[in-house]
Amino acid sequence: MAASATPNTLSLLTLTARQLRDTMEWAVAGSGTPGQFPQVSGMQFSFQPTNKPMTYLRATNGTPTAIDFAGERLRNLVVVRADDSLDLVVEDGRVVGDPDRTFRMVTLNFMASGGDSYFALTQGKDRVDLTPTGTPMVFNTDGGEQRALADYLARLGSFAEPDGGAEFDLRVQNLGRRGDAVLAPSVRRLEPTPDGTSVFFRSLPGRRYSLQGKDTLEGAWEALPPQTPGDGTMRVLKDPRPGTAAQRYYRVELLP
């Protein structure tokens, strides 16, 4: 999220799955508020901008008091937990699993207080502002957004990759510009072994996956047994033929 002229404090919040869904639904409601559209990490989601947006009931001063219409734009949402496991929070617009399970997140104190009409964030629990109230906020104040951004950029160093269009974005997937790949398995690495090639990929709980391979870019995909269940962690499927990693193309398929 872009840093403002006057730095905000970073704030920690605990949200339920339902509150996280409502937060991200409002994020893509597209009311025209400049700061409303999200820039996120630790999650990926898809939205359909032509679907009906979330709306609020509001007080006379414009402050949201309740959700009037829950919205239909957010389609799928996956969160990466602290242990690097995946949690499927929203599928086809509906919360998956226990709606009261919780997630710890960081945002701006402005947003946590309901700025840009982020009503669901005001419902979060155990809020901790990383800079105490009353602290003068300057560029290098510990716990401030600008200091956090500067520290991240310093650790990152140079970044030479060109920015791509919305059709290439995997974190924020605009379904008006690209297909939905939030639930698609992502191959992380290949490991040749004496008895074949192991294909490691990120999985979702309760899903099943199969491996496919082909010898040329133009060739047809061939199913390679066996299948494996997902559990939210890294999983592995194997091509049993030895010495194939440098000679074959692979993809992991999510089974229906």
Image (cartoon, rainbow, N blue to C red):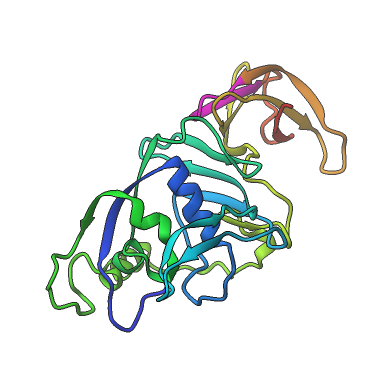
Q: Nearer the viewer, residue 64 or 208?
A: 64
Name the spot of residue 205 as percent of width and height, x first. Answer: 54, 27
* Residue 207 vertical position relative to residue 44 in the rendered view, above or below: above
* Rendered image quadrant of residue 137: bottom left
Residue 209 is left or right of residue 112, and the answer is: right
Q: Can you see residue 1?
A: no
* Residue 100, image x, y percentages: 41, 35
Task: Note whether 61 is above or below 166 in the view shown.
Answer: below
Locate the N terminus by quadrant: bottom left
234 or 40: nearer the eye?
A: 40
**Magenta residues: mostly which secondary structure?**
strand
Residue sitting at 54 percent across and 50 percent down? 44
| Residue 25 visible here | yes
Q: Residue at horizontal 28%, vertical 81%?
A: 6
Residue shown at the point (36%, 40%) measured from the top left: 82
Where are the magenta residues, as a range? 229-238
* Quarter holding residue 244: top right
The verdict on residue 237 being magenta is yes
Q: Residue 48 appears at what percent x and percent y?
A: 69, 57
Q: Is residue 124 above or below residue 95?
A: below
Closer to the camera in the image, 48 or 114: 114
Q: Quadrant of residue 55?
A: bottom right
